[in-house]
Image: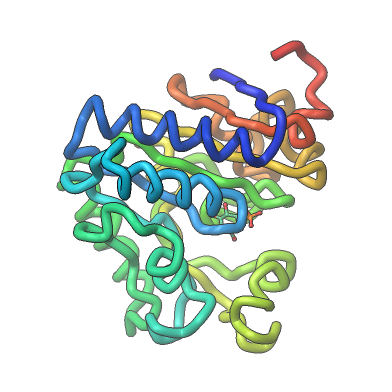
Amino acid sequence: MRVEVVADEAALAIRAADLVCDAVRAKPATRLGLPTGNTPIPAYAEIARRVAVGEADFSRADIYGIDEFAGVARTTPGTNSMFYRQYVHFGQRALHCPNPSATEPDEHIRAFADALRRAGGLDLCVLGIGVNGHIAFNEPGSPRDSRARVVELTPASREAHATTFGSLDAVPSHGMTLGVADLLEARRIVVLVSAARKATVVRAAIEGAQTAGVPASWLQSHGGVTWLLDAAAAAALSRGT
Ligand code: GLP
């Protein structure tokens, strides 16, 4: 596991874009998993800028969503599908997202994960982390061997999305997610974390015990993980980085 610390959010976006663009340059037909959330938005803007000026080419890359809400139309503001449309202005040719309006969401997300596996699996999966240690929608309590499934969202996760859905009541109670085991099958993983409010959970995930209580701690068992942190998110780490 590598831990890279950069000064601030702006530097995080540049370094994240470097890592993703390097992977796509090395393998143009990369299968790339991308998270939603506020953290990666500046990195997506930087990647889009590089694509627009011809510094990067994502025309052969396949982009996969790693989670989605369940029980709402795809065009509902706040869904991950809408997020990708809004912020991922590169590689849109091959954007694979679970369908939030699937009538059998459990079956749907399992089929989504199976199709990804049959396609060869993720070459690179970028992840964010929730303040409670969740990765994708694997909330605390998610075992290491958890697979793609429907999950009940925690109050904290629903509150985090109240603004984009318009109100807390409008946020779906359930989501669909690739499981921890599915995410760990990615060949490489880059975790993007900024902000002081994540410092405690970053320390637990990197230095604490591997436990379902902090799903991001399962990443310790993967040999190809890079944690990319800004200084505020790295502030509670005890070891030198
Ligand atoms: C969301 C997503 C995660 C994301 C996380 C962090 O709920 N399901 O994939 O990494 O929360 O979001 P943020 O970057 O806004 O803190």
**Residue drawn at the location 61% of the way across and 76% of the way down:** 164
Q: Position of residue 205 (x, y in %)?
A: 68, 33
Pick whichever, 68 or 212, lies toward us: 68
Q: Position of residue 78 (x, y in %)?
A: 53, 76
Q: Is residue 121 left or right of residue 204?
A: left
When the figure is inspected, residue 76 is found, relative to residue 174, above or below; the finding is below
Q: Is residue 42 left or right of residue 201?
A: left
In what quadrant of the picture does the N terminus appear?
top right
**Residue drawn at the location 61% of the way across and 21% of the way down:** 3
**Residue drawn at the location 81% of the way across and 47% of the way down:** 197
When the figure is inspected, residue 21 is found, relative to residue 63, above or below; the finding is above
Q: Looking at the image, in which quadrant does ligand 1 appear?
A: bottom right
Q: Is residue 1 left or right of residue 71?
A: right
**Residue drawn at the location 67% of the way across and 46% of the way down:** 133
Q: How is the image coloured?
A: rainbow
Q: Position of residue 152 (x, y in %)?
A: 58, 70
How many discs mark residues in the rendered view? Answer: 0
In what quadrant of the picture does the C terminus appear?
top right
Pick whichever, 20 or 207, lies toward us: 20
Q: Residue furthest top?
A: 240
Give the quadrant of residue 71.
bottom left
Give the quadrant of residue 137.
bottom right
Q: Position of residue 89 (x, y in %)?
A: 36, 58
Pick whichever, 90 or 55, lies toward us: 55
When the figure is inspected, residue 130 is found, relative to residue 56, above or below; the finding is below
When the figure is inspected, residue 77 is found, relative to residue 147, above or below; the finding is below
Q: Is residue 187 left or right of residue 17?
A: left
